């Protein structure tokens, strides 16, 4: 009898082991950019780096085709702009077509789509809200069932600003203005066996909460901590995560699964946004995740995460700050920016270099130095920055110490490279102020790029959301932000009037 019970115990252990699910460290590939790596190159990059999960902001057909039969788990999104563009309430049949063409057909071809994000941060204070999000969620889930795609899990992403700004996690709760909407969402998540996908950007939380920089890193070298009863917080990640844990507990969902939809560190565009800090952040964070340390309120919990992002996105709106365009682990040409060990073992190693990308010819467009008509110089500078990406010229950034000529040269070159060095439509003319050179104008920390040849059309048609500012005390909008064009006009005038020598 005793021997029989031993065999039963072994069987139960094996059964439990068979149903235990290991977590993952995945990566987001944001493609809102002027240049992008070829999808097949990215698939090879993921496989060589051992990354088994990818998150896409849109189920682009060419990307899904490249991922076919790769066995890489895929998370895709039904974006907010699609709902607005198609007038949801009067034309919901478009969602049915969307599910059939962009989910059902790829799945039938062997594309491993596992999760569908139904709306991205629909109630964020930085975006135009999608108030009918529960209707959208229910209708989309219904279409998944109709197409026998019940294996695809569904959720909605939310940023940390859906929570009130508090000094301790125990005080956390949803913002009062959206609490009813969030509770409706939680009921749907529970009903559909879903989970909460949580986006966080620790470097932004530092600025909002006025925490010291050391609090952003898992290896906090300062004495700064936050004590909340029996719990002590030594880093921003655990603080932000447990704010959501407390909020879910108060809502009646203490065991709801939480997946980190976005987390990362920018390498340019602002104070502390450097490759060195990004390397340090990822080294400590990934080690913490891989060792399943959890958080003070969920110790030893396995947390699934998507790192943000694979490459930069130079067309992301600037309202969140210039650094938001520089969250890539890789440069546009597929070269890694810093050392990172995706296994979380903390080894000092660079990820695999992307193979197959081709750079355009080694030539740059620069300012010829003619300052006889400064009004024309200002106009051309503004034009170049408006239609390209001058975020590296912003304060504390890699190119913030350039003089007048180099500032304008940087803007001209960014426009020229973004346009694929196209000589049509002006090329490097800039009203007679531009000049081509084969001599690399890069200097110090400021890199003048030569972009890659893009063999595909990157994601387009993504509506730039209308963002609003907020004071983090609730839902009070402070003001409408200026457009990116106006922001760069202001920056350009500043640099032209007070150049650094």
Image (cartoon, rainbow, N blue to C red):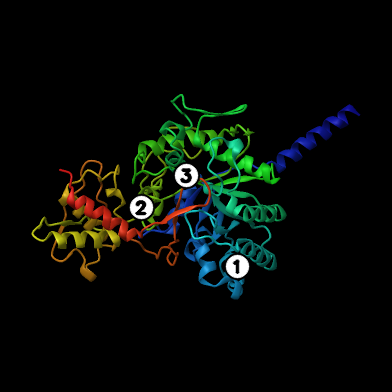
Is 24 situated left or right of 454 in this image? right
Q: Is residue 435 above or below residue 292?
A: below
For the question of whether residue 498 can be seen, the reply is yes
The residue pinned by badge 1 equals: 99
Q: In the depicted view, which residue is nearer to us: 390 or 244?
A: 244
What distance separates the C-alpha of mark 1 from that of mark 3? 30 Å
Q: In the depicted view, which residue is nearer to us: 24 or 219?
A: 219
For numbered disc 1, what is the local secondary structure? helix
Task: Give me the residue at 15% from left, 51% from top.
Answer: 405
Name the front one of labels 2 and 3. 3
For the question of whether residue 418 can be seen, the reply is no
Farthest residue toward the right? 1
Task: Give me the residue at 25% from left, 47% from top.
Answer: 447
Q: Is residue 408 above or below residue 3?
A: below
Q: Which mark is residue 351?
A: none
Whichever of callouts 2 and 1 sits on the residue coming sooner in the sequence is: 1
Q: Which mark is residue 201?
A: 3
* Residue 144 place in picture, x, y as percent: 66, 64
For numbered disc 3, what is the local secondary structure? loop
Whichever of callouts 1 and 3 sits on the residue coming sooner in the sequence is: 1
């Amino acid at each position: 009898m005793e021997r029989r019970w031993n065999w039963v115990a072994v069987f139960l252990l094996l059964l439990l082991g068979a149903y235990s699910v290991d977590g993952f460290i995945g990566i987001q590939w944001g493609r809102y950019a002027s240049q992008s790596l070829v999808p097949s190159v990215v698939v090879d990059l993921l496989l060589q780096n051992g990354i088994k999960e990818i998150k896409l902001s849109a189920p682009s057909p060419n990307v899904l085709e490249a991922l076919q039969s790769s066995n890489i788990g895929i998370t895709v999104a039904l974006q907010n702009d699609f709902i607005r563009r198609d007038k949801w309430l009067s034309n919901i049949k478009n969602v049915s077509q969307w599910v059939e063409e962009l989910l059902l057909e790829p799945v039938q071809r062997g594309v491993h789509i596992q999760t569908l994000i139904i709306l991205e941060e629909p109630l964020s204070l930085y975006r135009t809200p999608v108030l009918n999000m529960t209707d959208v969620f229910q209708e989309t889930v219904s279409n998944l069932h109709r197409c026998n795609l019940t294996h695809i899990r569904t959720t909605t992403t939310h940023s940390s600003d859906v929570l009130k700004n508090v000094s301790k996690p125990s005080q956390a709760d949803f913002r009062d203005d959206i609490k009813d909407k969030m509770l409706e969402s939680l009921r749907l998540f529970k009903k559909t066996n879903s989970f909460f996908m949580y986006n966080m950007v620790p470097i932004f939380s530092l600025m909002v909460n006025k925490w010291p920089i050391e609090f952003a890193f898992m290896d906090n070298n300062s004495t700064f901590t936050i004590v909340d009863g029996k719990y002590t917080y030594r880093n921003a990640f655990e603080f932000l995560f447990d704010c959501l844990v407390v909020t879910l507990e108060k809502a009646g969902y203490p065991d709801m699964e939480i997946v980190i939809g976005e987390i990362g560190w920018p390498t340019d565009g602002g104070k502390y946004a450097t490759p060195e800090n990004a390397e340090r952040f990822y080294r400590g964070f990934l080690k913490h995740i891989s060792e399943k340390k959890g958080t003070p309120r969920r110790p030893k919990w396995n947390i699934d995460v998507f790192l943000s992002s694979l490459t930069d996105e130079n067309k992301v709106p600037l309202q969140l700050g210039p650094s938001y365009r520089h969250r890539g682990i890789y440069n546009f040409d597929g070269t890694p920016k810093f050392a990172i060990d995706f296994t979380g073992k903390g080894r000092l190693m660079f990820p695999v270099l992307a193979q197959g990308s081709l750079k355009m010819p080694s030539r740059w467009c620069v300012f010829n130095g003619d300052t006889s008509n400064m009004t024309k110089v200002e106009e051309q500078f503004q034009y170049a920055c408006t239609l390209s990406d001058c975020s590296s010229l912003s304060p504390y950034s890699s190119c913030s110490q350039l003089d007048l000529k180099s500032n304008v040269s940087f803007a001209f070159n960014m426009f020229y490279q973004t346009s694929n060095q196209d000589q049509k439509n002006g090329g490097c003319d800039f009203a007679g102020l531009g000049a081509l050179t084969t001599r690399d104008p890069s200097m110090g920390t400021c890199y003048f790029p030569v972009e890659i040849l893009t063999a595909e059309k990157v994601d387009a048609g993504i509506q730039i959301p209308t963002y609003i500012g907020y004071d983090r005390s609730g839902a009070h909008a402070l003001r409408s932000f200026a457009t990116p064009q106006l922001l760069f006009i202001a920056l350009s005038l500043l640099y032209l009037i007070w150049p650094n020598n």
